[in-house]
Image (cartoon, grey):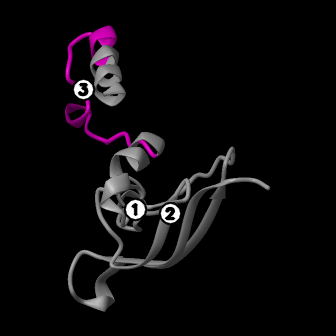
Amino acid sequence: MVKSMIQSQNVHYSYTEHKESLAIDGLDLHVKDGEFVVIIGHNGSGKSTFAKLCNGIMMPTEGTLLIDNMSISDEKLLWDIRKTAGMVFQNPDNQLVATVVDEDVAFWARKFRS
């Protein structure tokens, strides 16, 4: 049996309290270990929102989201989830800490080893 890496069941997310402004509306998705999946869409279609949900940066308004069978709703598992589901931000200033690639890689390697 192939292990599931991402499982979402009826996932909803809204940036406001109004249901009519849902960024994600009832997403069901199953990504197996080893599968390559591309999520594409127009600006504002929910791609970055879903990535942030998968990384535990934000929590679904409704529904269940598992990363490698770990619930993103379980705060004790957030660091393990983030080790599994990494995220690269669009703005390099949000992720680069050094002026040389070797130093930057060394920084992040040390950070995630501890």
- Number of labels in the image equals 3
* Type of amino acid at the residue the image marks with label 3: Leu
How far across and how far down the image is residue 32, in percent? 68, 54
N-terminal label among 2 and 3: 2
Element under disc 3 = loop
**Spatial separation of the CA atoms under disc 3 and disc 1:** 26 Å
Element under disc 2 = strand
Marks 2 and 1 in Cβ contact (< 8 Å): yes
Q: Is residue 49 visible?
A: yes
Quarter of the rendering occupied by the C terminus: top left
Using the rendered view, name the quadrant where residue 69 is placed: bottom right
Numbered circle sitting on residue 66? 2
Q: Nearer the viewer, mark 2 or mark 3?
A: 2
Extreme residue toward the front, this view = 76
Which residues are drawn in magenta?
A: 85-104
**Label 3 Cα crowd, 10 Å radius (few <14 / some 14-19 / many 20+):** some
Marks 3 and 1 in Cβ contact (< 8 Å): no
| 3 and 36: which is toward the camera | 3
Using the rendered view, name the quadrant where residue 57 is placed: bottom left
Q: Which residue is mark 1?
A: 72
